[in-house]
Amino acid sequence: MVEYRDPITGYQVRRYTEGPERNAKLYFTTENFSVDDKYFYFNKDVEGGLECYRADVETGELTLMTDKAYAGFALDREKNVAYTCKNETEVYAVDLNTNEMTKIGDLPAGGKITGHLTSANTGRIACSYHLDNKIYALVILDPGQEARIVYLSDYRLGHAQICPTDENLIFYIHETEGDAFQRTFMCDVEEGYVRPWYVEHPNEWITHEVWAADGTEMAFMKLRGRILIGDKDGRHFDQAAESEQLLHPCLSRDRKWLVADRISYLGVNVQEGVVLIERATGKQKLIATTGSCKTGADHQHPSFNRAGDMVLFSNPDENGIAQVCTIDLKQVMQDW
């Protein structure tokens, strides 16, 4: 771990990793910190897959959590537990107090997840899944029960996120790796139907959606540069912020703050970095600058710790490869 002063913002930043391997924080659609905010978790690229590590926020000490046999590591919204998939289909719960792993079930044989695992406050696990027969699906796994396929599709499904406080709702997208005619959908598990969530109009580009921790709303991008927030029913949407080249928005647990990355895309080049936004006022501030991303996996994907006073982000190095950093927001608040 090294500390440095950002040459543009002037704030102190901690960097916990260095290359040549990619070291990328968990995706912004899962919690990244333990419940006490003592540790955060990140993935390291290794030959043939990823290794997941725990980092001590204060000391920088690293602990290997899972090897390349595992994928989809994601943290519970409330409990100090993570969930991960071994050998594509075996689902394990990881006690983050002891690091002990317990198998809790199996996903359909021969398939693989198309993102990370997600969990509701009831313990239900949900994910988007590519079945052995190449059809895409939404799959749930309830404690003590067999996995169930709740929706099938010819579309490539991704970014599946069960509502943190409503196990009946699973958000998902049609993944095109770009714009989509209609991207966002909500699956009602009990009723057995799906419906568009944000209904897109011509020439709208919607992307990078994330639940609030309490499951009442979702934040997402409307390119270019506008952050929208909608209720979980998809009936009401407000613009929360607008700025140049924003891409991945994330809400603090109290929903009072947003953090997003600023990235060069669609032919527009900017100083890349991390932007903090006060939701009530729309005030925003560039709090950290970064290098330019080599690939989408190297994007900054910033997110808050659970207390909301620290932001974790990936900072592309001189080769554009992600390295994990944090910035303490207490220093930002002093001159907010």
Image (spheres, helix red, strand yellow):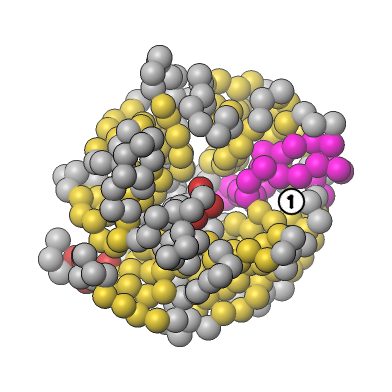
Q: Please tell me how many numbered marks the rendered image carries.
A: 1
Classify the position of the C terminus by image quarter.
bottom left
Residue 283: x percent and y percent?
17, 48
Question: Where 305 sits versus 118, above or below?
Answer: below
**Residue located beneath label 1 in the image:** 143
Give residue 253's quadrant in the image: bottom left
Classify the position of the N terminus by image quarter.
bottom left
Query: Residue 251, can we see it?
Result: no
Residue 255: x percent and y percent?
33, 49
Question: Where 13 sits versus 131, above or below?
Answer: below
Query: Residue 188, can we see it?
Result: yes
Question: Where 18 sits versus 262, above or below?
Answer: below
Q: Residue at x 46, y 39 (%)?
A: 209
Rate crowding at label 1 as few (under 14), some (14 to 19) or many (20 or more) other CA atoms within 10 Å: few
In what element is the residue under mark 1? loop
Magenta stretch bounds: 106-132
Q: Residue at x 64, y 32 (%)?
A: 157
